[in-house]
């Protein structure tokens, strides 16, 4: 009887040691990277941020976060998220709309194995979205061909009913629709990006920066 008890105790001890030696499952890298961005944004909102150790970060890069953001001078992702050299792979175009070269840039970061998180960063009072709201999709837009193409691309994201800048929430609603549309547009135009999101389950965050400095999440994928 004593032998049986000792054997049972020994087995219990072995099982406990074995369980304790099994490493915990790795944390979701996308969630970890977004937490670092949130912490960085909290630092940015204090009004004073600093960057140190820049000299040693110039030689190589393996940026884990790719950001598609607007060209607006008030919304530099490196400052908004307080991220130093080598942390963000950034594509910026008015209205956070990726053209062919922007898509190629995102594909490059994915194919190099850098990207653990893709962020679409829209922002308050986006001028490109404003121009799209003011444009009549039935009439020619008095602009250069390139600006015309940009506005028409943003108009693709608009859904009924129509709204004007004078209506409450129109600007924000259209900005949100354009940012969410960017994900489906990227997937439609790039098999590399589509496979990364749908097959390899690359995490995506669609976020909004208000001019008070705060970043909020509009949508998470995976």
Image: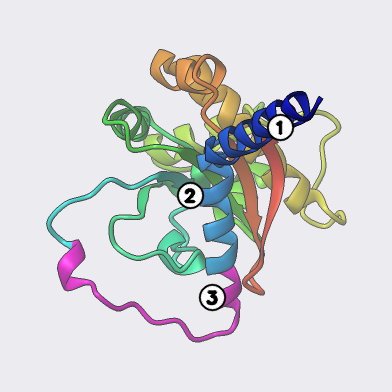
What residue range appears in magenta? 41-57
Q: CA distance from mark 2 to mark 1?
A: 65 Å
In terms of depth relative to the viewer, which is nearer, 171 or 138? Answer: 171
Task: Kindly indicate whether the residue at mark 1 contacts the one at mark 3 (C-beta within 8 angstroms).
Answer: no
Q: Is residue 151 magenta?
A: no
Q: Label 1 belongs to which residue?
A: 6
Residue 32 in view in this figure: yes
- In terms of secondary structure, where does tag 1 sit? helix
Q: Say which residue appears at 61% left-offset and 72% top-offset.
A: 42
> Which image quadrant for residue 167?
bottom right
In terms of depth relative to the viewer, which is nearer, 38 or 184? Answer: 38
Specify few, some or many for label 1: CA neighbours under 10 Å numbering under 14, 14-19, or 20 or more: few
In terms of depth relative to the viewer, which is nearer, 33 or 126? Answer: 33
Q: Label 2 belongs to which residue?
A: 69
User: For the view shown, which residue lies furthest in the left direction?
Assistant: 59
Q: CA distance from mark 3 to mark 1?
A: 60 Å
> Where does the N terminus fall, quadrant-wise?
top right
Q: Label 3 belongs to which residue?
A: 44
Q: Nearer the viewer, mark 2 or mark 3?
A: 3
Q: Say which residue appears at 45% left-offset and 69% top-offset.
A: 82
- In terms of secondary structure, where does tag 2 sit? strand
């Amino acid at each position: 009887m004593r032998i049986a008890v000792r054997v049972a105790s020994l087995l219990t001890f072995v099982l406990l040691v074995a369980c304790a030696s099994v490493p915990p499952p790795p944390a979701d890298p996308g969630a970890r990277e977004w937490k670092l961005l949130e912490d960085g944004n909290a630092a940015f909102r204090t009004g004073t941020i600093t960057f140190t150790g820049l000299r040693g970060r110039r030689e190589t890069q393996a940026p884990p976060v790719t950001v598609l953001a607007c060209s607006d001078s008030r919304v530099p992702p490196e400052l908004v998220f307080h991220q130093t050299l080598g942390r963000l792979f950034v594509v910026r175009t008015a209205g956070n709309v990726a053209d062919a070269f922007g898509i190629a840039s995102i594909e490059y970061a994915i194919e190099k194995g850098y990207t653990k998180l893709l962020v679409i960063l829209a922002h308050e009072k986006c001028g490109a979205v404003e121009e799209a709201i003011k444009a009549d999709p039935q009439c020619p837009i008095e602009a250069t061909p390139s600006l015309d193409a940009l506005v028409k691309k943003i108009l693709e994201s608009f859904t009924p009913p129509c709204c004007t800048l004078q209506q409450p929430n129109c600007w924000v609603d259209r900005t949100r629709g354009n940012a969410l549309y960017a994900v489906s547009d990227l997937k439609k135009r790039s098999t590399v990006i589509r496979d990364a999101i749908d097959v390899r389950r690359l995490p995506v965050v669609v976020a909004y920066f208000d001019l008070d400095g705060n970043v909020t999440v509009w949508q998470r994928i995976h």
